[in-house]
Image (cartoon, rainbow, N blue to C red):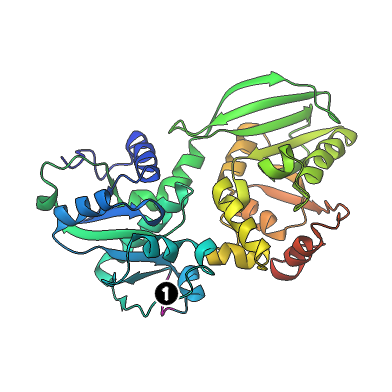
Amino acid sequence: MVNAREGTLNWRDHYRALSDVRRGVPIAVRHKDKFLLLVSIELVTDENIQEIERLSGERPRILITEERAKVLKIPHHGSFTSLTWPDWIGIDELIALGDPIKDLATPLKGPFSAIEEQDHALPLQSAVHLLKQAQLLPSGLYVTCTESNLEGASMITLDAEDILKFATQEANQLRPVVHAHLPLTGAEDARVFVFRPIDGSIEHLAIVVGHPNPEQPVLTRLHSECLTGDVLGSLKCDCGDQLRGALEAISSAGGGVLLYLAQEGRGIGLVNKLRAYNLQDQGFDTVDANLRLGFGVDERFFAPAATMLKKLGFSKINLLTNNPDKVSALEEFGISVTKRLAHKFPSNGHNEYYLATKRDRTGHIL
């Protein structure tokens, strides 16, 4: 049956919906008396297509983002584009429509007919948000129906407005669950605090070096996790250098905070970051790679960072960053940035183009 707890922000249901959509299980998005059934485009199968067709009695439509529509030269209106699903497109071609890695192998995409979906604009916008939260490609198949169509169906239902406000409310509910002393290379007097979202999903870390005075601006670094750079030593970015350099700088200054945020790949997730690397190998820069995937240039959200700083007792900081957007984002969420401090490291031959792109296209001060 349709979930009885619809209309309230239920953490368990939201997290279950994220799990379901990552497994290709259809989920329902509700707005008023209308329902939208959604399947991730990268996980479509004959079975899940048949399920949503059976429940709705209609042929699914295609949902892509404005960024992906621009890449495919498809007319777009607002943050998403709805398309009819032509009879001649099979599942492989459908998946290729959402996955830009396959663009060169499947260059013929179209013509497509865009659909005006004003009555379903909010749930479609919410569907895109949910796919991004699940760290999937932000493209899907969907059908629309009413509650009567879903009688006897067993799927999670989320309210469209709840999806849109979920990230902010999750950030506000972050709570520290444990901390421990952990001597680190370059910062031996360090304590690691683990902050867990209320839905039980991936934790963020705060590394407090020394005993900074909360009455004074605290030297702070916001570092988005980068498995490839921080752990594997990738030369394609400067993340590893920035992480280790920040810890050394904070320690040398007598103390401060490094927030290690679970926002891999500027918020698109590890798998999509590797897709972006694949596109970079095809000749696209880091910005165009994200746009071809259907994402914005930077999908990160800094409300969690502001919440963590406040719960640690810090509201005034000196920020180690080359990115002015981090300054404005933190100030938007109530953190006073007294000073921005440059955080630059030499290029290595593999990341020169990447750093130049950040300077020339995303406003980094390098």
Left or right, 135 with respect to 298, comes to left
Left or right, 161 with respect to 147, comes to right
Left or right, 138 with respect to 338, comes to left
- Indicate yes or no whether the magenta region holds residue 359: no
Residue at the image point whose x is 64% and y is 56% from the top: 277
Residue 170 visible in the snapshot? yes
Residue that badge 1 annotates:
109
The foreground one among 231 and 261 is 231
Residue at the image point whose x is 39% and y is 76% from the top: 77
Quadrant of the rendered structure where residue 219 is? top right
Q: Secondary structure at mark 1?
A: loop
Residue 49 in the image: state x and y as whole percent. Answer: 25, 54
Quadrant of the rendered structure where residue 3 is? top left
Classify the position of the N terminus by image quarter: top left
Magenta highlight range: 74-78
Q: How many marks?
A: 1
The foreground one among 359 and 23 is 23
Identify the amino acid type marked 1: Lys
Residue at the image point whose x is 28% and y is 47% from the top: 27
Q: Is residue 115 above or below residue 352?
A: below
